Image (cartoon, helix red, strand yellow):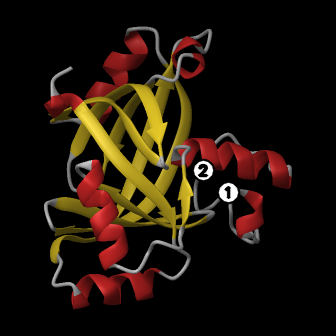
């Protein structure tokens, strides 16, 4: 498969993002974007076939609007590799209407704040989700490992699931009655790392 369609990344549980940011600054990482709010909407067919097959159909809005398709995930040493194709679209509401007219339904909404950097040919993002903080490193597997070591993150827990998978685990363990992973849904909820590690 053409490498341009491959996403290769590792997700690390990093509760202290300030410490990660200091390590990035010390390593002379280049900021790509300041902290930005993201709204992600995942779609599925009426029978849930996309989710059942491990397929992600997502519309994301941050500083731009992008439609993403992901599938074919494999995991080795906590590094996830999968097919990913993404296209920027002009109008979030119009794309949402098109997807619904095609028969897809909103399966989940999830939110986060993201700050992005680049270092040693990889992209590093600091993600703040309603249930915890994480660092994602995307690039070639060998470079990912080098950057993990350079940033002193080799002791951080590697998360093999997606943010949605982690949300579903947290939701089940805490008995939360919410479809969506929003900051409002988690207001007043104390999430310990034991709920997803």
Q: Residue at x 31, y 43 (%)?
A: 8
Q: Does residue 27 appear in the picture of this structure? A: yes
**Label 2: element kind:** loop
Question: From the image, which quarter does the C terminus lie in?
Answer: bottom right
Marks 2 and 1 sit apart, C-alpha to C-alpha, by 7 Å
Q: Residues within 10 Å of mark 1 (few under 14, many from 20)?
A: some
Q: Position of residue 78 (x, y in %)?
A: 49, 49
- Quadrant location of residue 96? top left
In the depicted view, which residue is nearer to us: 111 or 18? 18
Q: Position of residue 46 (x, y in %)?
A: 58, 11
Q: Does residue 115 appear in the picture of this structure? A: no
Q: Position of residue 193 (x, y in %)?
A: 70, 67
- Quadrant location of residue 1? top left
**Res 185 label:** 1
> Relative to residue 70, is residue 53 depicted above or below?
above
**Label 1: element kind:** loop
Q: Position of residue 11 (x, y in %)?
A: 46, 56
Q: Residue at x 68, y 62 (%)?
A: 186
Q: Residue at x 75, y 72 (%)?
A: 188
**Contact (Cβ within 8 Å) of mark 2 with mark 1:** yes
- The residue that label 2 is drawn on is 181
In the depicted view, which residue is nearer to us: 86 or 142? 142
């Amino acid at each position: 498969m053409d490498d341009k369609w491959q996403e290769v990344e590792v997700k690390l549980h990093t509760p202290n993002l300030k410490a990660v940011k200091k390590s990035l600054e010390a390593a002379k990482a280049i900021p790509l974007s300041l902290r930005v709010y993201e709204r992600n909407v995942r779609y599925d067919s009426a029978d849930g076939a996309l989710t059942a097959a491990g397929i992600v159909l997502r519309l994301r809005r941050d500083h731009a609007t992008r439609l993403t398709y992901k599938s074919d995930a494999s995991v080795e040493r906590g590094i996830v590799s999968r097919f990913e194709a993404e296209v920027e679209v002009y109008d979030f509401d119009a794309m949402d209407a098109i997807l619904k007219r095609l028969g897809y339904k909103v399966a989940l909404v999830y939110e986060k704040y993201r700050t992005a950097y680049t270092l040693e040919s990889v992209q590093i993002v600091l993600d703040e989700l309603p249930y915890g903080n994480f660092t994602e490193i995307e690039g070639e597997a060998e470079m990912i490992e080098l950057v993990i070591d350079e940033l002193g993150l080799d002791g951080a827990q590697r998360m093999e699931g997606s943010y949605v998978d982690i949300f579903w685990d947290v939701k089940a363990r805490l008995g939360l009655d919410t479809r969506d992973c929003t900051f409002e849904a988690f207001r007043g909820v104390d999430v310990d790392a034991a709920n997803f590690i």
